[in-house]
Image (cartoon, helix red, strand yellow):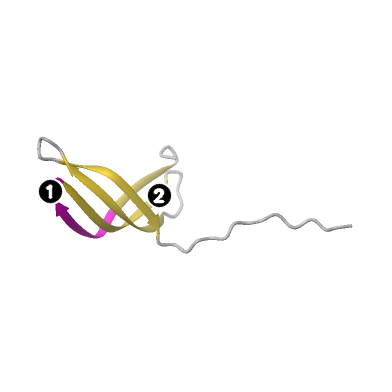
């Protein structure tokens, strides 16, 4: 995928709650994929949660990450029903 498109992202909002060595970050973001062969970029708006854990050196690392698209769900395309004879 990365050979065919460039990916960029940006956070559009975040809310952080810290308790001891754990933190929960609720965020919204935009991911943009731009085809390397030309064409229009596609932007997807997402929301998600990072669970962060403080390391022994004081830095924070993501321990869990979950996100989903803000786009409406698309119903699967089903094959046509077979006619009974």
Where does the image place residue 14, in percent across and percent down from the top left?
22, 59
Q: Position of residue 10 (x, y in %)?
A: 28, 54
Q: Quadrant of residue 28 in the image?
A: bottom left
Q: Is residue 3 above or below residue 52?
A: above
Q: Residue furthest right?
A: 85
Of residue 65 and residue 38, the one placed in the foreground of this image is: 65
In reply to whether residue 28 is colored magenta, the answer given is: no
What is the residue that sits farthest to the top in this orientation? 56
Label 2 crowd bin: few (<14), some (14–19), many (20+), radius 10 Å: some
The x, y position of residue 70, in whole percent, is 40, 62
What's the magenta bit mostly, secondary-structure-wise? strand
Residue depicted at x 10% and y 35%: 57
Q: Residue at 75% across / 57% down in the picture? A: 81
Which residue corresponds to the image point at 89% horizontal and 57% vertical from the top-left? 85
Left or right, 51 with reference to 76: left
Q: Nearer the viewer, mark 2 or mark 1?
A: 1
Residue 20 forms part of the magenta stretch: yes
Report x, y in % for residue 20: 12, 48
Residue designated by label 1: 20
Q: Is residue 23 left or right of residue 9?
A: left
């Amino acid at each position: 995928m990365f050979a065919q498109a460039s990916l960029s992202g940006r956070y559009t909002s975040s809310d952080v709650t810290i308790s001891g060595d754990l933190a929960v970050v609720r965020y919204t973001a935009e991911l943009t994929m731009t085809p390397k062969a030309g064409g229009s970029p596609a932007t997807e708006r997402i929301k998600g949660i990072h669970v962060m854990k403080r390391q022994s050196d004081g830095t924070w690392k993501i321990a869990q990450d979950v996100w989903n698209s803000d786009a409406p769900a698309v119903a699967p395309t089903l094959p046509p029903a077979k006619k009974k004879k």
